[in-house]
């Protein structure tokens, strides 16, 4: 009987999917109605997006984020290496560094750097036979921009140290031993063998952190750095169109974050090349790109 | 600089001791290997074969004894009758002359077969990249893998990876080659291709110390076989003697289990 002749198959009806799809669309339509009734002067938003002060804010946001992240990566690698070193003092120092700079809120760190002049009015580095290498009022040395950079970079460097450490640990010790066996020095082994392979583990969370960093620069507005939020506030203090200027700033954040996300995607693809077989050629081609190449070391 | 001893053994290990915590894994091992000789280290797992091999290029530090390669104490500098421990950077210089092939291949995963072979000559020896490339292709050809030069390790079989690893070591033009169970991680049908490459190398006069469980390879390629157990040398001799008519009961037991 059974199996003797073909029986028609009735597919499962996914009623739940239909219901949830309808609910989601309905909610979105309601949201659309709400926004249409909102008292927003939509026409003014495109103008604000391209205001001169917005351009300045965008530039400062991007520059502050890029420099802070770059400094954080360099410091992070250094701290990660100290954390892994055989020297107990270095190990302890690295752990304490991470504990401190990861533990304090970024805003608090920025404020401390900004107000450093209150406790150290001048910063001097004396030379051994009289005179000074540096002898300047703290207010001159640490501008609002520098204070924001220090706060953001040092906080992020603690996170980077942990990311780099995880990356280094992920590379099999056999790779180090093989490098040693062909006579590579510890430095060359790290640069040529371990770090490039640790990148696969390091890049995704670093990309995440960089996106966070782009948004985190908004905290610099508190100490008067003209980044996107401060620029938006500048405009709205004249015309009181608070929401419209904030939306203009929001648009720029989304643009910058999207660009960063695309960049991360390509970096990941390039460093995963060796695992993917047929697609390896794409990765090889990408590794030839100057930007990607410089990011490897 | 100490004088290279041309007539004496290329490798001389004297009373090598090594402990991990309270466990002594090497209890004073002596070994002499002359130029062009192939020596196989045999023994049950846990005998200390691999640890001893790793002491020969200072991947493991030794607690006592000495390892001399071509008249130089490995990991140390002889001055005024004392052995001064070398910095890792200076040990790296000594390791240039000592090739090593690992059980788990350890090819650089982010580099192609060719790039793996080129890395040492270019980065360590400072060979001109074009020349290094040509020599690397020749070496890959010798191990039968010229056609896979652009493949990444993950795209190669275990046997192919191990042959690339051998080529990578040979690219440094080493005086001595160490093999740490080079076929133990391979599927049985891939063991032959690696042993064939090693056999050729032995016939061409490469000085080799091989930790292996392949009795047939030891019987055929080795000039001398060293049987280790519990961190000490039990017996040493030509393969015909040690493998066919062992003197010690411990060796007989091991061979009976391995060859059955």
Image (cartoon, rainbow, N blue to C red):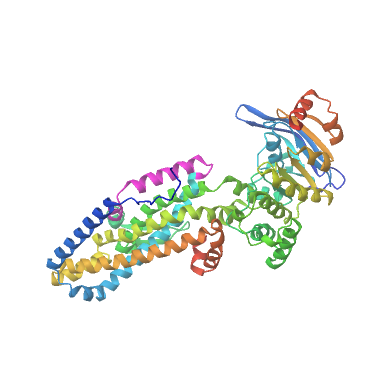
Q: Is residue B75 magenta?
A: no
How many numbered tags mark residues here?
0
How far across and how far down the image is residue B98, in percent?
73, 48
Is A9 left or right of A23, judged from the image as shown? right
How far across and how far down the image is residue A67, in percent?
39, 63
Label the magenta part by its dominant secondary structure.
helix
Residue A140, picture quadrant: bottom left
Residue A193, picture quadrant: bottom right
Q: Is residue A104 magenta?
A: yes
Viewer-closest of A138 and B195: B195
Quadrant into which the N terminus of chain A falls: top left
Is B48 left or right of A130, judged from the image as shown? right
Viewer-closest of A15 and B138: A15
- Which residue occupies 64% across, 53% down? A184
* Region in magenta: A84-112
**In the rendered view, would you say A279 is above or below B162?**
below
Viewer-closest of A120 and B203: B203
Is there any visible trace of residue A93 in the rendered image? yes
Is there any visible trace of residue A137 in the rendered image? no
How far across and how far down the image is residue B203, in percent?
84, 49
- Which residue occupies 25% across, 62% down? A221
How far across and how far down the image is residue B201, in percent?
80, 50
- Which residue occupies 46% across, 64% down? A266
């Amino acid at each position: 009987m059974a199996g003797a002749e073909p029986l028609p198959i009735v597919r499962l009806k996914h009623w739940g999917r239909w219901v949830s799809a309808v609910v989601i669309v309905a909610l979105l339509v309601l949201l659309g109605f709400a926004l249409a009734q909102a008292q927003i002067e939509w026409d003014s938003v495109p103008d604000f997006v391209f205001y001169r002060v917005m351009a300045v804010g965008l530039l400062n946001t991007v520059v502050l984020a890029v420099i802070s992240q770059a400094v954080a990566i360099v410091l992070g690698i250094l701290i990660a290496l100290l954390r892994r070193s055989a020297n107990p003092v270095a190990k302890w120092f690295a752990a304490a560094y991470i504990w401190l700079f990861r533990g304090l809120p970024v805003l608090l760190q920025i404020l401390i750097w900004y107000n450093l002049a209150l406790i150290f009015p001048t910063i001097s580095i004396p030379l051994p036979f009289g005179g000074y290498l540096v002898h300047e009022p703290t207010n001159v040395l640490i501008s609002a921009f520098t204070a924001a950079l220090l706060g953001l970079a040092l906080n992020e460097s603690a996170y980077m140290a942990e990311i780099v450490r995880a990356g280094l640990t992920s590379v099999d010790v056999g790779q180090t031993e093989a490098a040693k066996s062909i006579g590579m020095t510890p430095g060359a082994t790290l640069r040529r063998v371990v770090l490039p392979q640790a990148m696969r583990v390091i890049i995704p969370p670093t990309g995440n952190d960089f996106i966070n960093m782009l948004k985190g620069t908004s905290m610099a507005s508190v100490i008067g750095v003209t980044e996107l939020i401060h620029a938006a506030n500048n405009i709205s203090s004249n015309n009181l169109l608070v929401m419209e200027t904030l939306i203009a700033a929001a648009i720029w954040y989304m643009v910058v974050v999207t660009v960063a996300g695309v960049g991360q995607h390509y970096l990941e693809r390039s460093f995963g090349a060796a695992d993917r077989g047929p697609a390896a050629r794409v990765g090889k081609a990408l590794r030839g790109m100057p930007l990607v190449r410089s990011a490897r070391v | 600089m100490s004088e290279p001893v041309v007539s004496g053994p290329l490798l001389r290990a004297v009373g090598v001791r090594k402990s991990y915590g309270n466990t002594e894994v090497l209890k004073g091992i002596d070994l002499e290997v002359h130029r062009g000789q192939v020596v196989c280290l045999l023994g049950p797992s846990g005998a200390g074969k691999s640890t001893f091999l790793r002491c020969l290029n200072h991947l493991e530090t030794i607690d006592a004894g000495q390892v001399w390669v071509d008249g130089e104490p490995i990991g140390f500098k002889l001055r005024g009758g004392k052995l001064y421990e070398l910095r890792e950077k200076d040990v790296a210089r000594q390791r240039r002359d000592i090739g090593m092939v690992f059980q788990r291949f350890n090819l650089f995963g982010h580099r192609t077969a060719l790039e793996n072979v080129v890395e040492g000559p270019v980065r360590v020896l400072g060979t001109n990249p074009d020349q290094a490339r040509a020599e690397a292709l020749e070496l890959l050809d010798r191990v039968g893998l010229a056609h896979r030069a652009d493949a990444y390790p993950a795209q190669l079989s275990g046997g192919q990876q191990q042959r690339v690893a051998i080529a990578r070591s040979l690219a440094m033009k080493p005086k001595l080659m160490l093999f740490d169970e080079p076929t133990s991680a391979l599927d049985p049908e891939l063991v032959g291709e690696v042993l064939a490459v090693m056999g050729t190398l032995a016939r061409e006069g490469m000085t080799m110390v091989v930790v292996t469980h392949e009795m047939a390879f030891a019987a055929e390629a080795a000039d001398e076989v060293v049987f280790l157990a519990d961190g000490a040398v039990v017996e040493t001799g030509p393969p015909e003697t040690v493998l066919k008519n062992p003197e010690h009961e411990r060796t007989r037991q091991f061979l009976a289990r391995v060859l059955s």
